[in-house]
Amino acid sequence: MKKRVVYIFSGLLIAITVFAIWRTPITEYKPKNNEEQALTQLFIKYVSSRNNRDVEQFLSTLRDDCQYMITKDLTVTKDQLSGMLPDLWMQNDDGTVAFGKCMVWECWHENYYETIMLINPKFQISETHADVEFKIVSGLFMDDNYFELIKENNTWLISRFSRPIF
């Protein structure tokens, strides 16, 4: 009986570990159709421009009327966000903090991360609207992120970014 409990416990521990570690980065995701392919390319551009601090390319992934969550108490427009970047990405080249507030996924007990990774995408797509959920990974930190997108002139753009607030 004792061995059986140990085997069951070990199996559960292995299953939980595999589940916690399993990650499909957006760069390795295999789209199921053309719309997922277009959205995947948009999010690859989004992450790449964020990680390379390319403000213009980052902003090009957002609609003009985009609502972008910075903290639980602050959601800004694309225009407002453009005035906050690149300082909002927290670290200057010399490693010093550049801005008083950090983006929600970059603050965890004052840990700031230079790069992010979007993993495990979940797509819900209609003709002109899409809801996409990702886990976002920064260093050891992982959190849920939600994107609403609109397709206009055969191009997908982010219209809203948010995350759950507890």
Image (tube, rainbow, N blue to C red):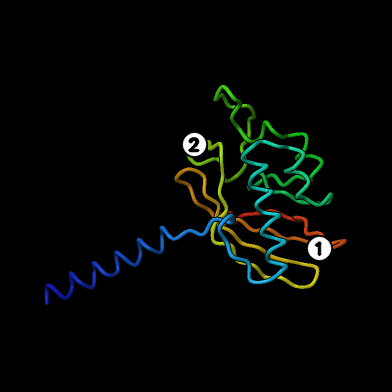
Residue 84: image quadrant is: top right
| Label drawn at residue 100 | none
Asked if labels 2 and 1 touch by Cβ distance under 8 angstroms, the answer is no
Residue 151 circle label = 1
Say which quadrant the N terminus sits in.
bottom left
Q: Residues within 10 Å of mark 2 (few under 14, many from 20)?
A: few
Q: Amino acid at mark 2?
A: Asn
Residue type of the residue flagged with mark 1 = Lys
Q: Nearer the viewer, residue 49 or 84?
A: 49
Farthest residue, direction top: 94
Q: Give 165 or 1, whichever is nearer the viewer.
A: 1
Residue 4 on image: x %, y %? 16, 76
Kindly state the secondary structure of the residue where label 2 is placed. loop
Residue pictured at 63% horizontal, 35% vertical:
89
Q: Is residue 10 left or right of residue 38?
A: left
Q: Given this view, does label 1 or label 2 mark the residue nearer the observer?
A: 1
Label 1 to label 2: alpha-carbon separation: 35 Å
Q: Is residue 158 left or right of residue 27?
A: right
> In the image, is residue 16 above or below residue 49?
below
Which of the marked residues, 1 or 2, is nearer the chain's N terminus? 2
Q: Quadrant of the C terminus?
A: bottom right
| Residue that numbered label 2 is attached to | 111
Total numbered circles = 2
Residue at the spot 69% in from the left edge and 53% down from the top edge:
161
